[in-house]
Image (cartoon, rainbow, N blue to C red):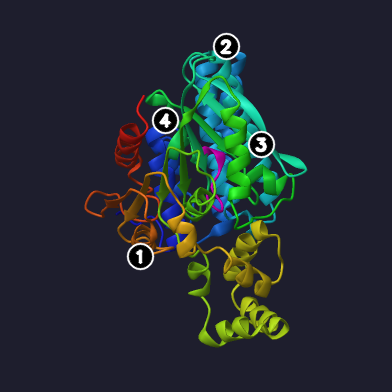
Amino acid sequence: MHAFFKDPDLQFAVEGVLGATWSRAADVGEVLTTVDRIPNGDRRAWVQQWSATAERLAAQAGAAEAEGHRRTAAARWLRAAGYWSEATDQADATGEFATLWERHRDAWDRFVDLTDAVGEVAVERLFVPYEDTTLPGYLFRSGPVDEPRRTLVYTNGSDGSVVGAWTRGIADALARGWNAMTYDGPGQNAALVRQGIPFRPDWEHVLTPVVDALVARADVDPARIAVMGVSQGGYWVPRALAAEHRVAAAVADPGVVDVSTTMLAQLPHHLVRMLDSGDRDRFDTEMRWALKLSPATRTVLQWRMRPYGVTSPFDFFTAARAYALTDDQAAAIRCPVLVTDPEHEQFWPGQSAQLVAKLTCPVTLLRFTAEEGADSHCEPTAAGLRGERVFDWLDEHVPA
């Protein structure tokens, strides 16, 4: 794979944006010219240049709307939303996270409204009852409103945007005649930024209200609901399926059995021992000294802690340990499950195979390789191949 940056996080992000071109959520020329303006490793320039590209697209989208070109305007708003989302990923370094996140969400909502207005795809905003509030969601339909159809529920990861839900699930689902629904769960997108709801490990308390809302609808076939979990959603979905048995089939991309391993692997052994012994004050003191020496690491840690609703590194690493799938939970899953297994998985290596070994339900392990250009976490540069294989499996297990 061509290296755009030495920084692995920025390189991975570029690969993801290039993959989004498959579903027209990015354009190659816009991506390459933006990347060309960013010096290697310069995270402030990353924020500035993706924001500049998004601003330009937004102005063009507004002009297209004024001229009555709604389809063109919708396409431009979608790309602008994606580019602003890229800016937010590094925006803690500039203090602009909340502002840029709102710009990304506003652009997405313009895409949603115009897509619905064009009439080829109907889009409905949902408000899923959740405890004493609601969770925001979107339901996309490509068929008659009152016809019960197969429905895909897309569950995002720890930092995935709504545009990511479009590129990794919704667009392919619509092309095959599915309904497609995505929602912001605790710690995700609007539930975090606007409502202040943090992550929780027991995702059955999230997915079950989502399924409740769908099965009550005339345009959803309650016997043909599939669920896809991407990135950290590869933990949340299996965890929820241990208790929620109305799902016909599920996808974990990739399989995750212990979320904390990717965090704990960054810690020296003596800090892990402090976690084990519960020495919170000493752990946080040592972390503060270490983070003073590495502003970039401090920024990444602040970004990672935000959805957990904590500011103490000790609390963050301790909380992450609760996100682990037990053998009993895995054994309770009944529906067929597809688990992707990309070569060079960098966050949870080996855990797809571990999840498959735990499951007692019908399970398929789907390999993706570097030779295919489909390696790395969530197969970023192989959106087409990934979609073909995943949705062929879904079509077999949840027939039209």
Residue linked to disc 2? 68
Cα gap from disc 3 to disc 2, whole angstroms? 29 Å
Circle 2: residue type: Gly
The residue at the point 63 percent across, 39 percent down is 209
Q: Which badge, 4 or 2, comes first in the chain's sequence?
A: 2
Q: Dot 1: what SS?
A: loop
Position of the N terminus by quadrant: bottom left
Badge 2: few (under 14), some or many (20 or more) residues near its Cα, within 10 Å? few
Residue 176 makes an appearance in the image: yes
Return the residue nearer the eye: 71 or 251.
251
Residue linked to disc 3? 136
Residue linked to disc 1? 350
Number of marks: 4
Residue 158 located within the stretch drawn in magenta: yes
Badge 4: few (under 14), some or many (20 or more) residues near its Cα, within 10 Å? many
Q: Which badge, 1 or 4, comes first in the chain's sequence?
A: 4
Residue 36 makes an appearance in the image: no
Q: Dot 4: what SS?
A: helix
Q: Position of residue 129 (x, y in %)?
A: 70, 37
**Range shown magenta:** 157-163
Circle 3: residue type: Pro
Q: Of the numbered discs in the image, which one, if any, rests on residue 173? A: 4
Q: Report the predominant secondary structure element of the magenta stretch.
A: loop
Extreme residue in the left direction: 371
